[in-house]
Amino acid sequence: MKIFQNKTFVGGVCIVLAAIFAFLLLPSMNKKKGETQTVYKLKTSVSAGTQITEEMLDDKEVGSYGLPETIVKNKDDIIGKYTNCSISAEDYILTTKLSEFAADAQLDKVSANGHKLITITILSVAAGVGNHIKAGDIVSVYSFIDGKTVIFDELRNLEIYSIENDDGENLEEAQKNEDAEKIAATATLIVNDSQAEKLVLAEYSGKLHIVFERRGGV
């Protein structure tokens, strides 16, 4: 009899809980499932490092239930940002996929390898190999100090990170702009501490002349 009473009690509790779930929780869950949220998706797939403009976005009305917490809901928080990774047209735009700055895989590689960047002055077209050098090229840097040509072993076979014009613009980008200066004024090189020390010494003690060795990867 006691066992039967216990079963009856447990059954009653289950019925009460089921009623609470049915009349209170289910309507709330269904309501949330029925709510919608405006989100933004890309019209076409883009690769990492792409700056997003307003014209690239489509607004979509989707169910708000189950949306990722990091989804970006405000269009102004997307426009002008750069993508950290490839994003397809069907993907949600998440905060983790956006950055204030363009991803720079080469710069990350430089830092990861313990190298540094240093910029030297190109005093003439001749000193810059007739404006023919570009990022990725392997060069050596000769110095003209006290009337003599000095060749430091540390300054052989350096990789060029970028070439800049007088305005500090990347020369490869400047080539696309009709009004931009297209003559090399500085070269930024990937170096270690010893190479950086020798370049600073050469920069302030005399004149530098870049000697092209080979294209990068060759």
Image: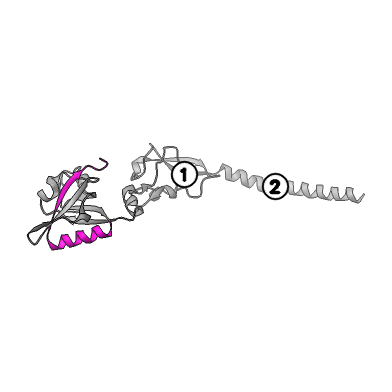
**Which residue in the rendered view is the most extreme toward the left?**
147
**Which residue in the rendered view is the most extreme toward the right?**
1
**Which residue in the rendered view is the most extreme toward the front?**
153
Q: Is 14 left, or right, of 71 in this rendering? A: right
Q: Quadrant of the C terminus?
A: top left
Q: Is residue 73 visible?
A: no
Nearer to us in this view, 2 or 75: 2
For label 1, the residue is 38
Q: Picture coordinates of residue 128 (x, y %)?
A: 14, 49
First reached walking from the N terminus: tag 2 or tag 1: 2
Q: Is 204 left, or right, of 68 in this rendering? A: left
Residue at figure coordinates x 8%, y 62% from the top left: 146
Residue at figure coordinates x 15%, y 48% from the top left: 211
Q: Amino acid at mark 2?
A: Phe
Q: Quadrant of residue 34?
A: top right
- Residue 88 has which mark? none
Q: Picture coordinates of residue 45 (x, y %)?
A: 38, 37
Numbered disc 2: secondary structure:
helix
Here the colouring is one colour
For label 2, the residue is 21
Nearer to us in this view, 168 or 215: 215
The range drawn in magenta is 192-218
Q: CA distance from mark 2 to mark 1?
A: 30 Å
Mark 2 and mark 1 residues within 8 Å of each other at the beta carbon? no
Q: Is residue 135 visible?
A: yes
96 within the magenta span = no
Q: Quadrant of residue 155?
A: bottom left
217 within the magenta span = yes
